[in-house]
Image (spheres, rainbow, N blue to C red):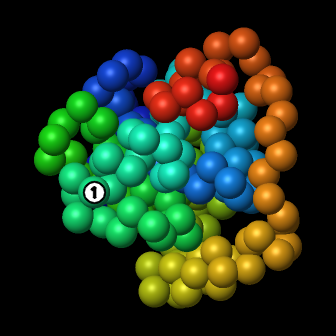
């Protein structure tokens, strides 16, 4: 699996699609923003116009917000993408995020990781509640959201 940590910031870089209404998902995005000092990753919500268009163009369900999707190269029409824990692991490595979590995701078999992911996805709103919009920590961060969802 090729990592995206060699990618440069810009229109052709990796984009993480996430549930914009989920507190846990937004917390993960905030953690990735803090970790990604080079600004490699960009973000869009699954519910937003750009996320919806991408999902439909790639034959993925446009009403399933339980899976994050890492699009390796947003500008490429046939770009590879990774879902659930595969996408999270690559996003963590690209951002220089928590090394222990990235290593754990790499070691555990995908079936086990994704089973755990699905359980958390099903319970996340009960456990963490809905997302309450908060100001982003740094003035450059809103520009990392390609759909303007956090501006």
The spot of residue 9 in percent (x, y) is 42, 21
Residue pointed to by mark 1: 56
Q: Which residue sits at x=80%, y=59%?
A: 130
The foreground one among 8 and 145 is 145
Image quadrant holding the N terminus, namely bottom left
Q: Is residue 112 above or below residue 149?
A: below
Q: Secondary structure at mark 1?
A: helix
Q: Position of residue 151 (x, y in %)?
A: 66, 23
The residue drawn where x is 55% and y is 70% is 66
Asked which quadrant contains residue 69, the reply is bottom left
Q: Is residue 14 left or right of residue 2?
A: right
Tell me the residue at 55%/86% (across/down). 115
| Quadrant in which residue 56 is drawn | bottom left
Relative image position of residue 86 (x, y in whole percent): 44, 64
* Residue nearest the viewer, comparing 51 with 11: 51
Q: Position of residue 78 (x, y in %)?
A: 14, 47
Judge the density around disc 1: few (<14), some (14-19), many (≥20) Cα neighbours within 10 Å: few
- Check the image and report above or below for 122 versus 79: below
Q: Residue at x 74, y 79 (%)?
A: 123
């Amino acid at each position: 699996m090729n990592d995206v940590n060699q990618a440069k910031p810009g229109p052709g870089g990796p984009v993480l699609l996430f549930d914009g209404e989920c507190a846990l998902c937004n917390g993960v995005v905030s953690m990735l923003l803090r970790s990604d000092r080079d600004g490699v990753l960009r973000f869009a919500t699954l519910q937003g116009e750009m996320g919806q268009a991408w999902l439909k163009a790639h034959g993925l369900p446009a009403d399933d917000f339980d899976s994050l999707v890492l699009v390796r190269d947003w500008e490429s029409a046939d770009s590879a993408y990774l879902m659930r824990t595969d996408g999270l692991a690559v996003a963590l490595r690209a951002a220089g995020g928590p090394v222990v979590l990235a290593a754990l995701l790499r070691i555990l078999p995908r079936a086990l990781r994704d089973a755990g992911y699905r359980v958390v996805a099903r319970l996340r709103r009960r456990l963490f509640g809905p997302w309450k919009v908060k100001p982003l920590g740094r003035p450059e961060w809103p520009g990392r959201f390609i759909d303007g969802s956090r501006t």
